[in-house]
């Protein structure tokens, strides 16, 4: 019979507390950290291996932006299951718009625009206009902080 509650054991260490950590949370934090390292240090051999094998891409941010992935090794599955810790709390800084997907990347932490529209319509617009944010903006110089949107004549999304 347990003599002390597990949640009590896991309290922040103070006088008399054991100061143990909840291993499930520690494990999730490790998975998120490895996912972040995969984005920030893509030249590392283990990152390149996972990118080629499971993402079929050299893009280091693909693990963040891809909608689904094949099941793989235990390590890959661990990264994949914990990537939402990163994706739920990140958004793109648009900058010049050449690296951010207009329809499929999160803006300011909101769901992607593609989730609000018919998939075939989004594909049609991507084919006509482009995939990246810069394709939807007027050219006004790389250094300008003010960006203006193009006016588009596109059919009804519904």
Image (cartoon, rainbow, N blue to C red):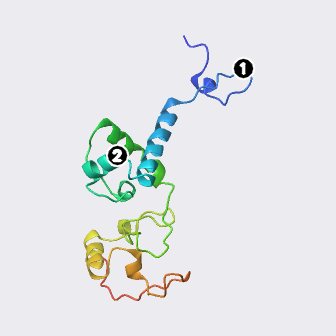
Residue 97 image position (x, y, % from top left):
44, 74
Who is closer to the viewer here, 19 or 154? 19
The C terminus lies in which quarter of the figure?
Answer: bottom left
| Image point (28%, 57%), residue name | 57
Binning the other alpha carbons within 10 Å of mark 2 as few (below 14), some (14 to 19) or many (20 upward) gives: few
Q: Image quadrant of residue 134?
A: bottom left
Give me the disc on residue 45.
Answer: 2
Residue 40 image position (x, y, % from top left):
45, 54
Binning the other alpha carbons within 10 Å of mark 1 as few (below 14), some (14 to 19) or many (20 upward) gives: few
User: Does 149 sit above or below residue 51?
Assistant: below
Who is closer to the viewer here, 6 or 39? 39
Q: Residue furthest right?
A: 15
Q: Earlier in the sequence, mark 2 or mark 1?
A: 1
User: Does 96 sit above or below residue 67?
Assistant: below
* Left/right of residue 11 with respect to residue 35 in the rendered view: right
Q: Image quadrant of residue 77?
A: top left
The mark closer to the camera, 2 or 1, is 2
| Image point (48%, 65%), residue name | 92
Q: Residue furthest top?
A: 1
Residue 94 image position (x, y, % from top left):
48, 71
């Amino acid at each position: 019979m347990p003599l002390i509650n597990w949640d009590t054991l896991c309290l922040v260490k103070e006088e008399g507390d054991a100061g143990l950590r909840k291993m499930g949370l520690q494990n999730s934090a490790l998975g998120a950290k490895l996912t972040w390292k995969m984005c920030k240090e893509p030249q590392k051999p283990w990152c390149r291996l996972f990118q080629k094998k499971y993402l079929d891409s050299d893009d280091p941010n693909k693990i963040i932006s891809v909608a689904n992935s094949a099941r793989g090794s235990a390590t890959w599955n661990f990264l994949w299951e914990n990537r939402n810790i990163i994706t739920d709390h990140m958004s793109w800084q648009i900058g010049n718009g050449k690296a951010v997907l207009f329809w499929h990347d999160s803006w300011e932490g909101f769901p992607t625009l593609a989730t609000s529209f018919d998939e075939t319509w989004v594909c049609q617009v991507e084919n006509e206009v482009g995939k990246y944010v810069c394709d939807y903006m007027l050219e006004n110089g790389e250094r300008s902080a003010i960006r203006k949107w193009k006016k588009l004549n596109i059919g009804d999304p519904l």
